[in-house]
Amino acid sequence: MTVIDYFEQFVSRYQHYKGGSWCYEDGCIYRGLQLLRDATGEKRWDDHLHRLADQQIEVDGALAGYDPLEYNIDHILAGRVLFPLAAATGDSRYLKAAGHLAGQLKTHPRIPAGNYWHKKRYPHQLWLDGLYMGLPFQIEYAQATVRPELITDALQQLSTALALTENPGGLYVHGYDDSRDQSWADPVTGRSPALWGRSLGWLAMALVDCLTMLPDEEATTSLRKRTRVLLTDVMERQTENGLWMQVFDAPDLVGNYEETSASAMFAYALLRASRLKLLGADQAQMAQKAGSRALNALIETKLEQDPHGRTQLIGIVHVAGLGGFDGNYRDGSPKYYLTEPVVSDDAKGVGPLMMAYAEHLLARKSV
């Protein structure tokens, strides 16, 4: 079975991740479908996208199960697909839906430094995940509605987030608590203690997606430099097998493992940064090589048949976070990240793999 056959099989049986409610997990799949359509020109990916997304969007743009007053930054991510859907169809409901999501961002609580809270139930906290959930959408909405001030705000949030989460040893920790109330937060810096692979994957995708949408000019110079350093650090941490670790900087930690979703995210970010000339010539070549190596490793080692003969993508950490959740307290320690369940065919892994493979195809077309 080819990887394209696997994607077709997966999306043909895919049902909404949270029972039909608008959510970021579905957004990962929607983004993958959009990029596969761009890369292949095949209508079937559009058909899958409409089958899934149109059920969630009413004529007036209302989104199924969506409550803006939850102030959950995760809910914004799936909105990225609304812009290409609007452009392709002319249907006004898509931009109306985007307006509902932008309305949430207009009143979304922020820490004093200007960054959105991760969620209302995680007050005063910035997580790397949230940068990808909210800021690429904000830039796309700004471009669609000619609101340059929203682009300025998004770039400032990215810069501030990097400053607040920067680890003394390099790279970026998962979260920051401005209040210092959480026991996972360092009482002086507010930072969480560990480097989690997928949170860095979200960060890499956020930076690459935001910067490749914008011109290379003075307003983006500093972020472009920091993104190049981040991607270089990521490439240096690639394992002999071509993937990346769950606890990113602790390959020898007992129980640590090569995690699929983060590896797919890095493959996508490296391939996209290379293709869209975010990097210098030498670094672009290195990024293309590292991204391709990771993509091949994922296809060769992480696609397996289950006992029923169905191909599935394995090795995806189901979820990880900081603070209280489902009666447990997640302390953000390196060992904590090794306690979360590892699952197969989760949207947070499959979507980025679709995106990475689409980038591979797009690069081949541009040669």
Image (cartoon, helix red, strand yellow):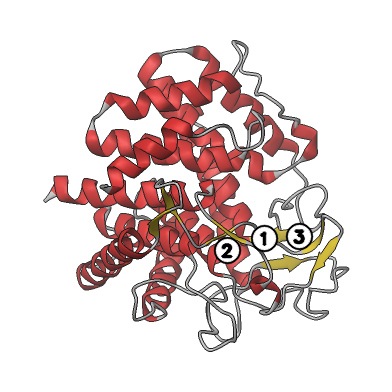
Q: Is residue 80 visible?
A: yes
Decide which of 336, 312 is in the foreground and name it: 312
What kind of residue is marked 3? Answer: Gln
Q: Earlier in the sequence, mark 2 or mark 3?
A: 3
SS under mark 1: strand
Q: Residue at x 60, y 38 (%)?
A: 17
Query: Residue 69 vs residue 306: left or right?
Result: right
- Contact between labelled residues 2 and 1, with CB atoms less than 8 Å apart: yes
Q: Nearer the viewer, mark 2 or mark 3?
A: 2
Query: Residue 16 vs residue 355: left or right?
Result: right
* Residue 212, percent from left and from top: 36, 50
**Above or below for 33 versus 336:** above
Count of numbered badges drawn on the protein: 3
In this figure, which residue is indicated by the disc labeled 3?
125
In this figure, which residue is indicated by the disc labeled 2?
199
Q: Which mark is residue 340?
A: none
Mark 1 and mark 2: span between their CA atoms? Answer: 8 Å
In this figure, which residue is indicated by the disc labeled 1?
127
What kind of residue is marked 1? Answer: Trp
Furthest toward the bottom, the residue is: 252
Decide which of 355, 217 is in the foreground and name it: 355
Mark 1 and mark 3: span between their CA atoms? Answer: 7 Å
| Number of other residues with Cα within 10 Å of mark 1, as a class: few under 14, some 14 to 19, many 20 or more | many
Mark 2 and mark 3: span between their CA atoms? Answer: 14 Å
Q: Quadrant of residue 244?
A: bottom left
